[in-house]
Amino acid sequence: MLTMSAEALSEVTTRIFRAAGAPDDVASLVAYSLVDANLAGHDSHGVIRIPTYIEQIAEGDLVPSARPRIEGDRAGLITVDGAWAFGQYAAHVCMDLASSRAKEQHVAIVTLVRANHIGRLGEWAEEAARAGVVGMVATSWGGGPYAATPYGGAGKVLSTNPIAFGIPLGEGPPFVLDYATTAVAEGKLRVARAKQAKVPDGWIVDKDGRPTNEPEDFYAGGMLLPFGGHKGYALAMVVELLSVALTGADAARDDKGRRNGAVFLAIDPSAVRPLDEFRRAATEINARVTGVPPAPGFDSVLIPGEVEARSREVRRTEGIPVAESTWEAIQAAGQSVGAHISV
C-alpha cells in the first residue's frame, strides 16, 4: 500500500486527463472531484476510476473535450444534455444551475441526459448545501451495465441507483446523505478486489444467486443486493423513474443503448423562512440527536457528512492510501495517453 498526498494525486490526475484531451478547467475539476472522494474516505469513487475513464475515452464512450449544454430553460426547470462529457463536470454545471436558479425562483430542477459517471453524489449535494440551498441528486444508468438484482429476483436489471441530499446547517459541515440503493456501491468491490480482500455478508450474490464474500464472484456474473431488502429495491425504482423516465434519458440513448440520466433539485430555505431561523432549527435538531450518550462500542453519535469531514482532516495530514495495483493501473493509463507518471 502506498501513501500519497492529495496534492500529488491531483497533479497526476490532472496531467493524465489533460493528455487524454480534456481542457485544463475540466481536467482540474475532475481531478479535484476524484481526489476529494479519496479524502472523504470513499476510495471507490476516487483515483481508482482513472483507468476506467481512460478506457472509455479510448472506446469513444467518454468525450474529454465535450461540455454539457442547456437544451431547455423554463423558469424553475432546466434540461441539460451532458454530451457524454466527463460526468463530474456535467454534474457540477447542473448543481450550480439548480442552486443559482433556486435563489431566484425558490425551487429549481435540472435534468441531465447523456451522462457519464458523475462521481460521488455527495459532492454535488454538499456543493448545494455550501451554496446555502437544500440539494438533492439522483442518477441511474437505465441501459446498463446493470449491477443489481431486484428484491426477490435473481437477475441483473438495475444499476446501483444512488441518491444524495445536502442540507446547510448553522455550524460545522453540512448534512450530507449519500448512498447507493444497493447494499454497497460497485466501486467498493473494486477497492476490495484491488486489496484482494473479502466483502461482508449481504453485499453480493454470485451468478446463481448464492451469497458470497468473494469480489471476483461479482465480476464473474454476480449481482449486488438492494440495501434493506424490499425498501432499498423500492427506492432504486424511484431513482430510475426520476433519472431516466422523467429526464428522457431513455429517448437520448446512444448507439450502444446507454440511457444514463440524473436529476438535480435545489430548494432555497429562505423562501420558506428566514435563513438564520432555518439554520438555528437545524442546529437544534442535530444537537438533540447527537447529544444522546453513545452506545457501547461507539465514541459519539455523528450526523451524515461528519465522517467525511473528519476523514478529510486526517487524510490531508497523513496522506491517502492507494493500493499498489491501483497505482500500477493509473501509471499504465497515463502511459497509454502519453503522460508518464512516477511516484
Image: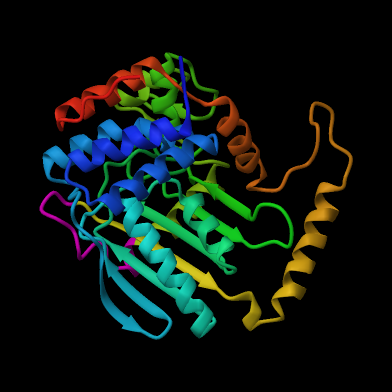
Q: What color scheme is it?
A: rainbow
Q: Residue at x 58, y 62 (%)?
A: 129
Compared across the picture, whether 137 is left or right of 116 comes to right
Across and down, in percent, residue 300 comes to 80, 37
Q: Residue furthest right?
A: 293
What percent of the width, then of the height, locates residue 295? 84, 33
Image quadrant where one finds the C terminus = top left
Q: Which residues are magenta?
A: 244-257
For the residue pair 78 and 159, the one nearer the viewer reads as 78
Where 84 sits versus 317, above or below? below
Residue 142, image x, y percentages: 30, 53
Q: Residue at x 44, y 35 (%)?
A: 7
Residue 284 image offset from top left, x and y in percent: 82, 61
Instruction: Say above or below: 275 vs 130.
Output: below
Q: Give the residue at x 10% y 53%.
A: 255
* Residue 224 visible, this orientation: no
Choose between 173 and 13: the one closer to the eye: 13
Predominant SS of the magenta segment: loop
**Relative horizontal placement of residue 84, taking residue 78 as reference (left or right):** left
- Residue at 48 percent of width and 69 percent of height: 265
Indicate yes or no whether the magenta region holds residue 264: no
Q: Does 195 sit above or below residue 284?
A: above
Q: Is residue 148 visible?
A: yes
**Whether residue 320 is situated above or below residue 285 in the rendered picture:** above
Q: Locate residue 329: give its quadrant.
A: top left
How many discs appear? 0
In reply to whether residue 252 is colored magenta, the answer given is yes
